Image (spheres, coloured by chain):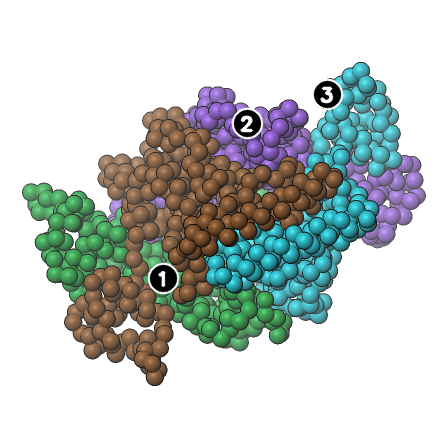
Chain colours: A cyan, B brown, C purple, D green
Amino acid sequence: MEELESFDRINVPALDEVLGKKFNVLDDGFVRVVDYMGGDESIVQAARVSYGKGTKKVSEDRGLIRYLLRNHHTTPFEMCEIKFHVRVPMDAWRQWIRHRTANVNEYSTRYSIAIDASQKTNPDEWRLQAKDNKQGSAGFFDAETGSKFSKREEDLQNFAREIYRERLESGVAREQARKDLPLSTYTEAYWKIDLHNLLHFLYLRMDAHAQYEIRSYANVIGNEIVNRWCPFAWEAFKDYIINAKSYSALEMEVLMKIINGNAAEAVKTAGSFGWLNHTEKGLSKNRERIEFEAKLAQLGLSKPW
Amino acid sequence: MEELESFDRINVPALDEVLGKKFNVLDDGFVRVVDYMGGDESIVQAARVSYGKGTKKVSEDRGLIRYLLRNHHTTPFEMCEIKFHVRVPMDAWRQWIRHRTANVNEYSTRYSIAIDASQKTNPDEWRLQAKDNKQGSAGFFDAETGSKFSKREEDLQNFAREIYRERLESGVAREQARKDLPLSTYTEAYWKIDLHNLLHFLYLRMDAHAQYEIRSYANVIGNEIVNRWCPFAWEAFKDYIINAKSYSALEMEVLMKIINGNAAEAVKTAGSFGWLNHTEKGLSKNRERIEFEAKLAQLGLSKPW
Amino acid sequence: MEELESFDRINVPALDEVLGKKFNVLDDGFVRVVDYMGGDESIVQAARVSYGKGTKKVSEDRGLIRYLLRNHHTTPFEMCEIKFHVRVPMDAWRQWIRHRTANVNEYSTRYSIAIDASQKTNPDEWRLQAKDNKQGSAGFFDAETGSKFSKREEDLQNFAREIYRERLESGVAREQARKDLPLSTYTEAYWKIDLHNLLHFLYLRMDAHAQYEIRSYANVIGNEIVNRWCPFAWEAFKDYIINAKSYSALEMEVLMKIINGNAAEAVKTAGSFGWLNHTEKGLSKNRERIEFEAKLAQLGLSKPW
Amino acid sequence: MEELESFDRINVPALDEVLGKKFNVLDDGFVRVVDYMGGDESIVQAARVSYGKGTKKVSEDRGLIRYLLRNHHTTPFEMCEIKFHVRVPMDAWRQWIRHRTANVNEYSTRYSIAIDASQKTNPDEWRLQAKDNKQGSAGFFDAETGSKFSKREEDLQNFAREIYRERLESGVAREQARKDLPLSTYTEAYWKIDLHNLLHFLYLRMDAHAQYEIRSYANVIGNEIVNRWCPFAWEAFKDYIINAKSYSALEMEVLMKIINGNAAEAVKTAGSFGWLNHTEKGLSKNRERIEFEAKLAQLGLSKPW
């Protein structure tokens, strides 16, 4: 294996510039970078350990990183590590903490008095339940209705905080006094993760189906921080993961027939997949067909049924 | 490697008897076993793969399991897997979920309406903040004071639920409507874990310093479930982990001198560790010394300083 | 949450039929199922915990499993667990063990005498180094040349075993005596993993670029075992992962232009990605372009440059 | 939470001094630090996030780190990360890689020609099989016998390398040509791990029962590297883990009686544990009793039976 010429720690000046800087999220949350190890350079360095001598000339860094990412050679991306200090409502933190391959130290409300801040919802931020997605929201309430919700929220958050203080002042144990704090209460944590697992977190949480609150954090981490830290990896991630399109084996079969002008064959094949069952009111609802139709539209193609 | 004679799945009749049975915890929580794989028998089976042929006669199962556990041969314990259905207040679940080596499917309050139950604190259950332990509780309030706390809690929980219903009925998205629910709201989950990691969970959560709520769950899982599932492993765990005592290198040095009657030497050594610094009011507070004194007392020995 | 009506352990009769049966792999290896927990049914059960009451009618099992898999809802797949007994050459095991989210007990050559078997290569099994893939093979040697390699291999394996025996008979410690055994020596292990992580293993190791030896094991595990254990999950995995096609953001841009008949625009866009740099000998080698051309061909489309 | 005053990356000058320096291990192996994140300071920083404001004065760093370590507050130790470049015989690497909570990029012998070095055993390094420990060694062969073993080893390693070269020169695929290389062949890797998991690795691999080869690496990592990187954590680890003594519940019961002069009671209790079964030849072999006797001797106490 080729001798490394230098063993200074890898520095990424573009990230150093924002070290410690708070990127604000929601009404009172933030994300900031506390420390990091490695960068694009260490992805390349790790890949080249696998390849041994003499490969430096073959691929330049950007190309190599793109090659690794699209071929699922994920281990070199694990060689980069980053540590954040985050301030997040507990409700969003409940989702965040489900990502297990990370190191966490959270502010303890057993040991200390809970952070005196709850996420407040402005009148124009109240979201309507989505009709077609049981776990989503779609559109906003008008400001007038929103004002009523916001007022009621304020009352509830104030009452909860009043009771919390009452308990503490009376000597109730902190670990018990906190039990009725609202999920909107802010918590803080150090959160440390490697780049491979961070990108997976971002893939799931920057997705349009992720809840607005955690998505806001993910967007900041991705666009403001990873973008500075590992620009080649970030670009490759956007090209090959975030903005890529996947076609299932079934979709490929039908798509090829459509592209090659065999509409009748395409319909027959789709039918054999159970996509085209009819009811009195027309085609019955079939998720797989509906998703495929959206992909066809995106390609500028019409559905042949 | 020796041929296994039979390949039926391993069954543990004592656990089968309680499969699906709800063990109640707190006012409205429970734990129950949904499925499992393996038992004491599979720990032994796995250990014997490592040892190859002909070891069956050497050790009998109980002795082998005890040997493995006290010598940190942990991998055979990973060969047992268990799946629970649990109902837990979110506040305790926040601690629970920090154990990362487990598989989890939690009830979704984005998709469904939150479980209509919050952990209620009875008048005699309000705990005082511990004086000597910043993250603990010690003793209870009298029933009269407790009644006031309980009444106030009821008001808060009712108000929070009222607002939650109001939002849902007005069409606020479930994912947002839930944001001010109290941490005392119950959640449910499937929780699947291997025996090695479960024992580690129990070690930390059955500990006297663990919060009462999660400790209650841990005690049920340990005493009612693991006890039936893997009785040899459970016994060994109690003997070698839960009820074992550890002496640091420093403690051993002082202890040996005390046991051998060299009180003066013991004092000198303890002094060299910085355990015996004096202030005007006597010995200054030193955690390591205080913990050692407790261990001495437990052994029926007096401190020599 | 809906009450489960029954709490018998989940059984999969199709898998029970092959419990303990050795599926032979390579010249002297095998895979067999020792125990398992769950099946398609428990994926559905876990998903429905997340969704709460009343969803049973909405989706039938197959549809739900397909939905979960294509939308990256991976946690329900973690609720299935399987334990294998495998016999594998150490060289393939070195790759296998890189999958970290599994439980392992391997045969110990510190404790026991190494298994007296090495993977032998038949005369017609010697593979040529691939020209276009530094880490692959392509085609076979003729039998005559292969015979020479096989004879030399036999000599080496015999010599290594002779020296190993010599050392053991002279009293060399087993842990040291083994140090020069060839990587082709067989080892055995119990290997336990959840379905989600097993599918990821299969995705990487059934791939045409995986080494023949480990691919042989992966194919048996997938086609013979998972296929029986969780047929819906297996089908979905093949449709959405194994046989799916992914198009990068760049590929989508060019593809849409080609499909819509804008060849000139497609060429321009490809050029802006650096795919069409010219040298004296024509287009310079560009991996991303070459991969895209293969995808075009698969769709029955011609490249516009 | 208290504002951090400064956000420069944490540097540890004592470790910087040896960054990139090869610490030699065995005849041709090494360990060196490539990069790191954090140090004692970041353990303290992470712990204080949990504790919130105002704790800085309460504990000084060394005391806090010792407190965390002996009370199993392990998460702050996960906030330190280190990346090594190692060169290790594959036989030892097989043990090393069993530690799953680490990131790894290993030199690929599919892609590149295997490193041309095998671990050689000097005449005075051949170890005898331990009599009382099936998986250990005890003592050495005399140099004359050792010379014969070393000569034979050389022949075998040369023969294996000759055949490897023969295959490569004939065009056999690298991935197949390597299949009969001896386990003594050196490999290289980048190995990245957090401090908590590294200490666990060291606990198991610095142990007297660990195999000499991997123990040699562990000793270097611990004494030469962690010692410089996180001196307080390292000291605490030695005091509370490496050099601590643990007494099982059973041992504590008997020990207390012995210390308090109740020899007869101690014997009775030990008997009730099954430690004192007699055969014609005296006390039958009982591992738990034998281990306890060794602990008594260490305390300067005689066994009462």
Is residue B123 toward the left or the right of residue D303 in the image? right
Q: Is residue D295 visible?
A: yes
Residue identifier under label 3: A274
x and y percent of residue D97 in the render? 47, 51
Disc 2 from disc 1: Cα separation: 45 Å
**Local SS, label 1:** helix
Name which residue type carries label 1: Ile
Q: Name the residue under label 1.
A: D241
Q: What residue type is labelled 3?
A: Gly
- Residue at 34% across / 84% down in the picture? B280
The answer to whether tags 3 and 2 share a subunit is: no
Give the crowd class for mark 2: few <14, some 14-19, many >=20 residues within 10 Å: some
Specify the amino acid type for callout 2.
Glu
Image quadrant where one finds the C terminus of chain B: bottom left
The local secondary structure at tag 2 comes to helix
The residue lying furthest to the left in this view is D280
Chain of the residue under the numbered disc 1 shown in the image: D
How far apart in space, not on screen, are marks 1 and 3 (Cα)? 62 Å
Above or below residue A9? Residue D281 is above
B53 vs B5: above or below: below
